[in-house]
């Protein structure tokens, strides 16, 4: 059971292979990229210690069987590695392996490893190719596709980064079986995002099959991941550098980032959970502004609840962040143009659009409700 999606970016086009057990094919899929790149060099596999314990050995075996000599670089798990210190450690390790400009670096992990490795590869010797083997649902449906790479700065997340497209994405949905339930659900928020943003039929499919996908139904998983990747690939092919449509992928993220900031980027609220609440708030704001039927907003929230995702600010544990505090965080967010807040709003399920024409008062009311 597998699906193939191509990201149509001309000379930088690449394939996304989604399937159960796809890791077993990694050697065969990566080999052609290596021989084109001159051959015999050792291939670095960058991962974190959680993923290394669970999924590194099978990948190394598969690579060895294909005659690829690989060596692992194991980073600390978590956002802490997406830092200048993490970049220094990783690029030092890559240079020690004497990787040259014809080399290929493999990222095996979640969005943290993918973002860090992509960035390190992008700046190493002015640009080395890299491959994504995403191991979280979030990484499979979102961060591994589209070429955004970054590390964090003291001033904020993802502020030091570049566009650097991978040469291939290999998404094995079987790897998701070891993912903690909370991480899986958080990744699912990004899956729902694709339906809410641009595909009502996909949303409808998720209402029926989403629970099965989350429970480990392989066919449902492959379909959900592949469809999400296809939607992201289409948008990225149209608007690689986010001058237009790509911004639609930020549905729920203006609110979501403010909620993450207000809860200190802590365990109280992880990214996907913040996005889930953020999307529900975007629906409410759209209804309040008379843009979206209330029924669509209710239907959206009903699905989040059914699946076990939070959908209101009061679902967050601990002290409730105030509307004022959240607005202050939004004003600091990167999506501020000319002092106006930019939002992705909805005309209905599957009909997101970008606007910077939102009265602050309405935003406050939604945040205080
Ligand atoms: N580049 C982009 O377009 C883009 C898009 C969205 C998010 N991001 C970035 O992605 C990052 C978040 O990614 P994430 O949610 O994957 O977090 P993550 O990489 O930190 O992974 C979450 C946790 O799951 C563990 N893990 C990973 N795979 C596992 C598996 N198969 N089984 C068990 N445990 C596993 C990790 O070790 C980690 O502890 C953020 O830094 C965010 O900024 C980037
Ligand atoms: Zn996100």
Image (cartoon, rainbow, N blue to C red):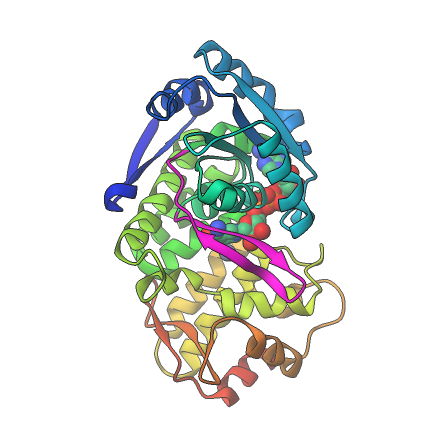
Is 151 or 7 nearer to us in this picture? 151
Image height check: is 345 above or below 237?
Answer: below
Question: Which residues, given as a range, are shown in magenta?
Answer: 146-169
Residue at 39% in and 72% down:
345
Numbered label tally: 0
Left or right placement of residue 258 versus residue 80 in this view: left
Q: Which image quarter holds the N terminus?
A: top left
Q: Which image quarter holds the C terminus?
A: bottom right
Residue 36, position as x, y percentages in the image = 33, 24
Residue 248, position as x, y percentages in the image = 37, 64
Where residue 246 sits, quadrant-wise, is bottom left
Residue at 30% in and 33% down:
4
Left or right placement of residue 360 versus residue 53 in this view: left
Residue 214, position as x, y percentages in the image = 51, 40
Q: Main secondary structure of the magenta part?
A: strand
The answer to whether residue 115 shows anywhere in this view is yes
Image height check: is 250 above or below 330?
Answer: above
In the image, is residue 151 part of the stretch drawn in magenta?
yes
Residue at 32% in and 72% down:
347
The answer to whether residue 180 shows anywhere in this view is no
In the image, is residue 362 part of the stretch drawn in magenta?
no
Q: Residue furthest right?
A: 318
Image height check: is 272 above or below 369?
Answer: above
Image height check: is 311 above or below 293?
Answer: above
Is 262 or 61 nearer to us in this picture? 61
């Amino acid at each position: 059971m597998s699906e193939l999606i191509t990201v149509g970016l001309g000379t930088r086009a690449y394939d996304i292979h989604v399937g159960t057990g796809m890791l077993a094919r990694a050697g065969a899929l990566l080999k052609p990229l290596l021989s084109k790149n001159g051959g015999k060099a050792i291939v670095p596999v960058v991962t974190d210690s959680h993923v290394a314990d669970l999924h590194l050995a099978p990948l190394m075996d598969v690579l060895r069987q294909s005659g690829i000599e690989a060596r692992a670089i194991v980073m600390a798990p978590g956002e802490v590695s997406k830092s200048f210190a993490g970049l220094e450690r990783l690029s030092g390790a890559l240079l020690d392996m004497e990787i040259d400009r014809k080399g290929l670096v493999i990222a095996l992990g979640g969005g943290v490893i993918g973002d860090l490795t992509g960035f390190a590869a992008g700046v190493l010797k002015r640009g080395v190719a890299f491959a994504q083997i995403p191991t979280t649902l979030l990484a499979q449906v979102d961060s591994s596709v589209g070429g955004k790479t970054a590390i964090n700065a003291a001033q904020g997340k993802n502020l030091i980064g570049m566009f650097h497209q991978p040469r291939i994405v290999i998404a094995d949905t079987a790897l998701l079986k070891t993912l903690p339930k909370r991480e899986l659900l958080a990744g699912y928020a990004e899956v729902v995002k694709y339906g809410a943003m641009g595909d009502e039929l996909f949303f409808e499919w998720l209402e029926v099959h989403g629970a099965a996908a989350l429970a480990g139904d392989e066919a449902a998983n492959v379909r959900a991941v592949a469809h999400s990747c296809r939607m992201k690939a289409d948008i990225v092919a149209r608007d690689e550098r986010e001058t237009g449509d790509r911004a639609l992928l930020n549905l729920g993220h203006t609110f979501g980032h403010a909620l993450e900031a207000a809860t200190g980027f802590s365990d109280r609220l992880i990214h996907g959970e913040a996005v889930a609440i953020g999307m529900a708030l975007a629906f409410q704001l759209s209804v309040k502004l008379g843009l979206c039927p209330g029924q669509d907003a209710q239907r959206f929230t009903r699905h989040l609840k059914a699946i076990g995702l939070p959908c209101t600010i009061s679902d967050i544990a601990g002290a409730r962040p105030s509307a004022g505090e959240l607005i202050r965080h939004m004003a600091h967010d990167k999506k501020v143009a000319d002092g106006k807040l930019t939002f992705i709003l909805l005309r209905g399920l599957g009909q997101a659009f970008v606007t910077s024409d939102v009265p602050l008062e309405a935003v406050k009311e939604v945040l205080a409700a």
